[in-house]
Image: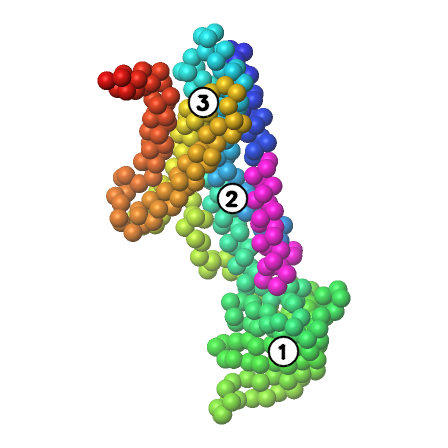
Amino acid sequence: MGIIDRLLLREIAKTLAVILLILTMILLANFLVRYLGKAAVGALSTDILFLVVGLEVVRTLGLIVPPALFFAVLWVVGRMYRDSEMVALEASGFSQARLYRSVLTAALPLAVLVAVLVMELLPWARASVTELKASEADRADISGIRAGRFNEFSRGGLVVYTEALSKKGGQLSGVFVQDRQRGRLGLVTAESAYQTTDPVTGERFVILTNGRRFAGHPGDLDFTIGRFDEYAIRIPEIDFVGVALPTSAKSWQELLASDSRNEQAEFQYRASIPLALIAFAILAVPLARSPPRSGVYGRLIFAVLLYFTFINLQRVVERWLESGAMPMWMGMWVLPLLMLLVAWLIQGVDSHRFWRWRRRRSIA
């Protein structure tokens, strides 16, 4: 590898690191705002807030590397064209083929990394987020209760309302509880409530004090009303076996072995991401070509539109695969090939042969 190749790779790596950092910070801020809103209304515990945000960022890492590399190559090579560096290099024997080779030298290892991220890390992070959210839905923990609103737990099996909450969140006052035990609806009102843990079994309980319990349906013979000094409600243990994982959280081995069109489409979507990285790395080279001393942005706007068109086409093709409107053998593989065709067309339009042909046609 020559000096020019190493220089090009170093510039691409530095620009890629900056773009990845910016995209990661944007995603982090976006997820943080979203889940802070959920935590503010009690839909998510603050104990797992930052863990969920971190897992969401990890889940998207493999998805942001391809656009980051695309715009890094576009910026570095485009700057070299605008500063006439590429003209000087071509005059010294640095060919287009060598430029493509240098870009692919950077793209191929990243494609392998992205394949690992989307095939292994993405489903793991997605499954972890799903399980954490399910645990929040099943957990009756008064630390997550908000005063003045109905707090739902165990998928609606337990509903808690409190008028006031102590400053440290350890005790509730003016409590209303609706729960189901063995299919029977129960209502409880109490002056106060607190949470405790059995030192022997380790089970958690919510203890309600000085209240009444109403069980059954009004008018039925088994409808009962009882008074109590203390009433304990056991917090159910979380059963992750019953949590249904979304298709995006399944491993690539499960997707590959499945006969479901939805799961096969998900596998093809993941497989298309590293292929798209290579295709867009190649596409960035002809897109970066611009006359010396031209505008700073060159074909950047066209490149952005092209990339967002590709993302939309990914989702459209995925829906077509799921519905059977497109055969599975065609699927996602055609989109990276389409981007390579666009690169070939742009390279042909920019070539001297094309302009000589166009001049001959205009003269004729």
The residues tagged by marks 3 and 1 sit, at their Cα atoms, a distance apart of 69 Å
The vertical placement of 9 against 54, above or below, is: above
The vertical placement of 200 against 82, above or below, is: below
Span highlighted in magenta in the image? 21-48
Q: Indicate left or right for 344 with 174 as reference.
A: left
Question: Which residue is found at the position 59% from the left and 35% from the top?
Answer: 21
**How far across and how far down the image is residue 44, in percent?**
60, 59
Q: Residue 97: tell me if it is visible.
A: yes
How is the structure coloured here? rainbow
Q: Nearer the viewer, residue 328 or 64?
A: 64
Query: Looking at numbered disc 2 in the image, what kind of residue is underneath it?
Result: Arg
Question: Which residue is found at the position 43% from the left and 19% from the top?
Answer: 100
Q: Indicate left or right for 54 with 335 as reference.
A: right
Residue farthest to the front, as pictured? 363
Residue highlighted by disc 1? 176
Q: Nearer the viewer, residue 45 or 281?
A: 281
Most frequent secondary structure within the magenta stretch = helix
Residue highlighted by disc 3? 289
